[in-house]
């Protein structure tokens, strides 16, 4: 057999892949498993999962890691403490609900429905490994059932791994350092395995898998948006608020005209007052510079009623329907993404990076990590944002 060039525990005989691992220690057993004829990338992914699962099991047996005999807190007690902390930290109810649901979903799929309201003792690195394995096994079973081509299986496995990483990241936010150091959490009895649970790495990353739209598609979208001012003014305003102020959908739906504020300074080039868009959210206000003054003036000119909201609609449900139309409009133009209108926010970020630099772009978009900013921006130049 021939050793794989990138994976030390992977060997090949023709197109057939074989996993081989000798467990640590003098008396360590040697594990062999055949993966059959699969692509190198899929074989390497499976090798990483198998190695981690075996080594985690070996470590657990060797060190006889057990949960202390004292009664640990339950998930229901945890959620009550989390809500108590969130209320004092001004975290929105929606964020609290989404984070709690992510942890519930993770525990349910990895440990079973009965564990959802049980003890926190199930939170171990092995639970993460089991969750990964369950997700990938379901994808492989679906691939076998539908006779997927190797490249299709590889893509679906990659998507599943991204889902694992995303769900786990959101679930673990319930145990962030800031939360665990709060008064609300001091009354909880957390498992000794929690630190290992928080540090256990997974391979998936939404940053790694993000693919920027093709230049031709971005150009097509930007050229089509101005026509909406005549054909669908409400949808045009929805697009403008996402492009001109980097507003996420949940913010843009409730954005108000009085969020635009004259900051008292004058642009040295145009000699016009500089305008800020002060996004008001549960965590506090965030000022976003309006970098496209011409777009802002067009938006004011298009204001057709006395509604305080930028996107017309009596109720939030009515305004949501406008953004749903915008999603379909963008997908019909070739921007076929899970959240196609979020790409408009990224175009604003491009302009902020080019004109104001990375620190200003971080502050305006609300990103806390510069790596996120760099991974998701297009940097195609200002041509893409000229809507006139």
Image (cartoon, grey):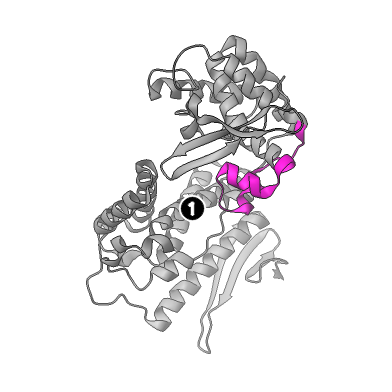
Residue shown at 65%/26% (left/top)?
A: 334
Residue shown at 43%/18% (left/top)?
A: 313
Q: Secondary structure at mark 1?
A: helix
Within the image, what quadrant is residue 186 found in? bottom left
Within the image, what quadrant is residue 192 found in? bottom left
Place of residue 241 in the rendered image (x, y in percent of width and height, measured from the top left): 56, 27
Residue shown at 39%/49% (left/top)?
A: 99
For the residue pair 176 and 116, the one nearer the viewer reads as 176
Query: Mark 1 sits on what residue?
Result: 164
Work out whether 146 lies above or below 37. above
Q: Which residues are magenta?
A: 353-382
Horizontal arrangement in the rendering, residue 371 relative to residue 260 (left or right): right
Place of residue 75 in the rendered image (x, y in percent of width and height, measured from the top left): 28, 58
* Extreme residue toward the bottom, this view: 26
Residue shown at 58%/64% (left/top)?
A: 47
What quarter of the picture does the C terminus occupy? top right
The verdict on residue 374 being magenta is yes
For the residue pair 43 and 128, the one nearer the viewer reads as 128
Work out whether 208 lies above or below 334. below
* Extreme residue toward the left, this view: 71
The verdict on residue 200 being magenta is no
The reply to whether residue 261 is in sight is: yes
Crowd tier of the residue under label 1, counting other residues whose Cα lies within 10 Å: few below 14, some 14–19, many 20 or above = many
* Extreme residue toward the top, this view: 230
What quarter of the picture does the N terminus occupy? bottom right
């Amino acid at each position: 057999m021939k050793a794989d060039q990138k994976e030390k525990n992977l060997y090949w005989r023709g197109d057939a892949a074989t996993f081989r691992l000798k467990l640590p220690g003098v008396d360590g057993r040697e594990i062999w498993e055949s993966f059959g004829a699969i692509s190198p990338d899929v074989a390497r992914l499976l090798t990483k999962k198998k190695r981690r699962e075996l080594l985690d099991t070996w470590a657990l047996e060797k060190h006889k890691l057990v949960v202390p005999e004292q009664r640990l807190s339950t998930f229901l007690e945890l959620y009550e403490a989390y809500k108590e902390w969130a209320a004092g930290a001004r975290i929105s109810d929606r964020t609290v609900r989404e984070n709690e649901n992510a942890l519930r979903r993770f525990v349910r799929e990895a440990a079973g429905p009965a564990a959802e309201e049980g003890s926190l003792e199930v939170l171990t690195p092995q639970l993460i490994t089991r969750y990964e394995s369950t997700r990938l096994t379901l994808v492989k079973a679906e691939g076998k059932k539908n006779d997927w081509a190797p490249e299709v299986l590889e893509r679906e496995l990659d998507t599943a791994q991204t889902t694992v990483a995303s769900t786990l990241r959101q679930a673990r936010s319930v145990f962030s350092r800031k939360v665990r150091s709060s008064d609300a959490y001091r009354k909880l009895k957390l498992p000794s395995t929690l630190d290992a649970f928080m540090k256990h790495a997974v391979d998936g990353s939404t940053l790694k898998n993000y693919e920027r739209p093709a230049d031709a598609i971005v150009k097509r979208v930007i050229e089509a948006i101005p026509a909406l001012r005549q054909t669908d003014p409400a949808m045009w305003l929805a697009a403008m608020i996402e492009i001109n102020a980097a507003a996420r959908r949940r913010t843009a739906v409730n954005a108000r005209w009085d969020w635009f504020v004259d900051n008292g300074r004058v642009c040295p080039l145009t000699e016009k007052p500089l305008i800020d868009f002060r996004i008001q959210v549960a965590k506090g206000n965030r000022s976003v510079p309006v970098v496209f003054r011409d777009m802002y003036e067009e938006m004011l000119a298009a204001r057709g009623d006395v509604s305080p909201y930028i996107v017309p609609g009596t109720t939030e449900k009515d305004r949501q329907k406008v953004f749903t139309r915008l999603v379909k409009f963008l997908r019909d133009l070739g921007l076929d993404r899970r959240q196609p209108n979020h790409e408009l926010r990224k175009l604003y970020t491009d302009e902020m990076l080019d004109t104001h630099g990375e620190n200003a772009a971080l502050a305006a978009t609300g990103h806390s990590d510069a790596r996120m900013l760099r991974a998701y921006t297009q940097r195609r130049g200002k041509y893409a944002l000229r809507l006139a």
